[in-house]
Amino acid sequence: AADARAGLMRDVDHARIARAWQGVRTGRHSLATFTGAVLKDGAGACPHPSGARDLPVRQARHDLLTGQVRLGTTADDPRNPYAYRGAGLALGTDLLGTSLLVVGPAGSGKTGGVVRPVAESLCLQALAGRTAVVVVGAAGAGLGPSDAYDVVIRIGSPDSVYDLDLYGGTTDPDEAAAVLAEALVGDLADPHPGSDTRRSTTVLAQLLGPFRAVHGRFPSVPELRGLLDGAPAPLATLRQGLQEAGQESLLRELDARERQMGHPGDVGGVLADRVALLDRPAFAGFFDTSGESRPFTLKALDHPVRVRVDLPERGHADASRMLARLVLAQFAASVTVREDRSLFACLVLDDATGVITPESVRGIQRLRSANAGVLLTLRTLDDVPRPLRGPLLGATGCRMALSGVTPWDGQDFAEVWGKEWTEARDVTDRQIIAESPAGKAVHAVRRAITGKAPTARAVTVRQVERERWSASELAHAVPAGHAVLSLTTVKGEHAPPLLVDLRE
């Protein structure tokens, strides 16, 4: 209270201490420890592991009491329900928990108007001990200064202090094989919701298991490439090590892999080609498995950590998409097995082109119950295979279409937003026919005075079902700097699609 009166207490301090007090009430922390920390440090009690009490710079308007960041104002437009017109619009973790999909062309404001404010809000809440956030984007995409993050992984840059664990920090060969197969060839799987990468997972598990049993670690990128290519020397070394250790079951796995190498249609060659994209001089210092370094793993999302991953899009576009799939697969696998789910975990993916696969859609559907969510941006839904567009829009509870989307993208949004009953008024004018001589005389006088035939107006009011937003309206009636956004909370409360001005 003394620090607050002296102006030394920030909104982050209040939110952080309130979070610590919540831990005391739930039994995770002792009351004596909390009381001692507050009496000793005041507003600086219970600090974030980084010691930071605020971000270096804020660009958006935040309310840490409710955990929200303001994005804009709902427009005073007839297409918006009357109760929502002119209201401020903000996003919080209760909305991001159902995941958010943002679609808009380049320059429409996806990064500056949505991704940057949300990432900034999540970083502030991480300092308050509420969230763990991973932000993935191209190098130089404007996702916030490096000082705003605890871990910055610049893949392909020799200046990078941190490395990324290719296997997600797991020691289980089957789990590592499943995540790695999704990253390598997830986009080559049959783009239907029921398909998977099971064959590729089996091939990788047949090699990762024996290699770990012999060497006590998983293979590096060059070693994995050699094994998938079927190089005789690495396979012979593996066989000799397994025979000396008496690993009969793993020998059978290795025998099966060698038999499959000669068969047509073996996926080992495709996997080797994809691994070759990472076996480049630019990535020589990354994905270390020797144990000399400790690469960052997404298993650390049990703590309020702030992570930014810079992808090397220039000259390595295919490798960047593969690494984005790897981070998404590791995120979905890690957050669903956390012991403490009171910490909200969020993955912000600035460009999800080539990332949406059948397995990733299933992973997004499981995040809501794990107190986690993702924010995905796309330039167009054409970057998603046609069979996956409906499941993707169904898996995300919050959907945003920015100004400039194409009519065929608008059609997908129009279908998922559905229709509503509205009142239609039909007004018709019919000519009155006079039958009596007196009536004809009166009509002749009226026609001479007004110049029009006598008519009677009929009004018909009926209930009709119409699209909330049509494809044509989404493509041509959304002004620049605006977006149409529908929201759903983790509790199931939802708002209809609203026209929002992102510039206010």
Image: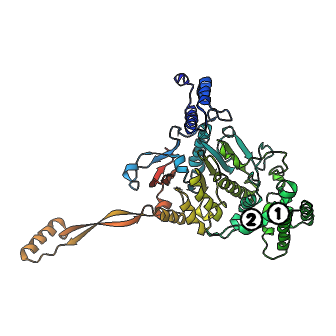
Label 1 packing within 10 angstroms: few (<14), some (14-19), many (20+): many
| Mark 2 to mark 1 CA distance (whole Å) | 10 Å
**In this picture, is 22 found above or below 497?**
above
Choose between 272 and 169: the one closer to the eye.
Answer: 169
Q: In this orientation, does residue 210 appear?
A: yes
* Image location of residue 440, percent across then percent down: 10, 74
* Image location of residue 415, percent across then percent down: 48, 65
Q: Mark 2 points at which residue?
A: 201
* Image location of residue 483, percent across then percent down: 50, 53
> Residue 206 occupies which quadrant of the picture?
bottom right
Residue ID at (68%, 35%): 49
Q: What residue type is labelled 2?
A: Thr
> Residue 56 occupies which quadrant of the picture?
top right
Q: Do callouts 2 and 1 mark residues in contact (Cβ within 8 Å)? A: no
Choose between 91 and 282: the one closer to the eye.
Answer: 91
Q: Is residue 384 left or right of residue 314?
A: left
Question: Which disc, if any, is residue 207?
Answer: 1
Question: Which disc, if any, is residue 463?
Answer: none
Q: What residue type is labelled 1?
A: Leu
Mark 2 lies on a secondary structure that is helix
Total numbered badges shown on the rendered structure = 2
Label located before the other in sequence (2 or 1): 2
Label 2 packing within 10 angstroms: few (<14), some (14-19), many (20+): many
Choose between 261 and 269: the one closer to the eye.
Answer: 261
Here the colouring is: rainbow
Mark 1 lies on a secondary structure that is helix
Q: In this view, does 494 lie to the left or right of 244?
A: left
* Image location of residue 78, percent across then percent down: 38, 54
Residue ID at (59%, 69%): 387
